[in-house]
């Protein structure tokens, strides 16, 4: 039997509506649940104090990774130059904060705003605008040892990148090895034909994977084909982070954008504990069989 080369993370929005400075204590909780890393959201960037977070993570012996979703005033694909410039400035600050807390990753919806609508089908111009911003950010991120990850999300959350192949296309347009792709089973369940092939397609650039269930509840209780997910990660020799991402019900910050209003588990500790148990069982079965 061979150990799967994953480091399991949990997203801090499982325990907070929006990150505030005192949320640094969530790190203790994430470590106590047996995870290897915490995923810190950078939406409330002013409340994120890198030195406090990295110290707390180090004390607990876990890693830090970061992700972000952009608001409409910071949309890299916008027709307005000032909005694209705000996106670039914000993402550069995110890279600095990520690097300052020792995160090797900055992933998420970093190419458009979350929840934005377009009255028409996006064209090559929209992708080129997003790529232009990401090229600048990626080059800067390389100098700071942070890898960018483009996370495709479902059609109700972005008009720009919904699938693994669209993420790969945008990453090729950025044309920087430091720009990777981050997949999420929840979004894949809505947009892809299946799990295995898209994960394999993204594998050359895969830098993070969200192990989110089809309803964002406890992994194992929905319709995601987890065996296929782990089979692809195994066959593609993926090494790196995988993360559990769920949101506190009725949270204005993320539940609003993702429409996760109902209670999907008794509480986040239960979701993580039961989900992690289940996912590690599937992981072991798949790796033992391979
Ligand atoms: Mn995700």
Image (spheres, rainbow, N blue to C red):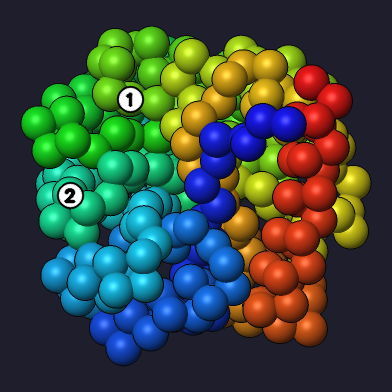
Of the pair 17 and 270, the residue shown nearer to us: 270
Query: For mark 1, does the 10 Å Cα neighbourhood hold few (<14), some (14 to 19), or many (20 or more) residues?
Result: many
Q: Is residue 6 visible?
A: yes
Residue displayed at 68% across by 17% down:
235
* CA neighbours of label 2 inside 10 A, class few (<14), some (14 to 19), many (20+): many
The location of residue 247, given as percent across then percent down, is 61, 70
CB under 8 Å between discs 1 and 2:
no
**In this rendering, would 240 be left or right of 256?**
left
Residue beneath disc 1: 179
Q: Is residue 193 above or below residue 26?
A: above
Nearer to me, 85 or 164: 164
Give the residue number, with chain letter if any, for mark 2: 99
- Give x and y (percent) for residue 165: 59, 16
CB of residue at label 2: within 8 Å of ligand 1? Answer: no
Q: Quadrant of the N terminus?
A: top right
Residue 235's place in the image compared with 117, above or below, is: above
Image position of 2 (left or right of 34): right
Q: Residue furthest front?
A: 1
x, y percent for residue 272? 68, 68
> Quarter holding the C terminus?
top right
Observer-side mark, 1 or 2, equals 2
In the rendered view, does 125 fall on the left or right side of 191?
Answer: left
In this view, which residue lies farthest toward the bottom? 22
Residue drawn at the location 44% of the way across and 45% of the way down = 108
């Amino acid at each position: 039997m061979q150990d799967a080369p994953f480091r399991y993370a949990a997203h801090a929005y499982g325990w907070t509506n929006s990150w505030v400075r005192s949320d640094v204590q969530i790190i203790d909780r994430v470590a106590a649940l047996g995870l290897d890393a915490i995923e810190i959201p950078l939406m409330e960037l002013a409340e994120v104090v890198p030195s406090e977070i990295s110290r707390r993570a180090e004390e607990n012996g876990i890693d830090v990774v970061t992700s972000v979703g952009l608001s409409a005033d910071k949309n890299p694909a916008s027709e307005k130059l000032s909005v694209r410039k705000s996106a670039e400035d914000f993402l550069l600050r995110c890279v600095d904060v990520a690097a300052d807390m020792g995160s090797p990753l900055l992933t998420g919806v970093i190419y458009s705003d979350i929840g934005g609508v377009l009255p028409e089908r996006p064209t090559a111009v929209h992708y080129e605008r997003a790529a232009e911003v990401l090229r600048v950010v990626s080059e800067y991120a390389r100098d700071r040892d942070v890898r960018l990850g483009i996370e495709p999300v479902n059609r109700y959350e972005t008009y720009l990148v919904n699938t693994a192949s669209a993420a790969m296309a945008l990453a090729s347009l950025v044309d920087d090895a430091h720009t990777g792709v981050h997949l999420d089973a929840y979004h894949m369940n809505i947009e892809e034909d299946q799990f295995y092939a898209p994960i394999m397609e993204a594998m050359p650039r895969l830098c993070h994977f969200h192990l989110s269930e089809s309803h964002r509840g406890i992994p194992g209780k929905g319709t995601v084909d987890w065996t296929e997910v782990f089979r692809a990660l195994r066959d593609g020799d993926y090494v790196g982070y995988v993360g559990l991402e769920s949101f506190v019900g009725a949270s204005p910050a993320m539940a609003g954008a993702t429409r996760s209003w109902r209670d999907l588990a008794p509480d986040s500790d239960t979701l993580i504990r039961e989900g992690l148990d289940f996912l590690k069982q599937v992981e072991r079965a798949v790796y033992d069989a391979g």
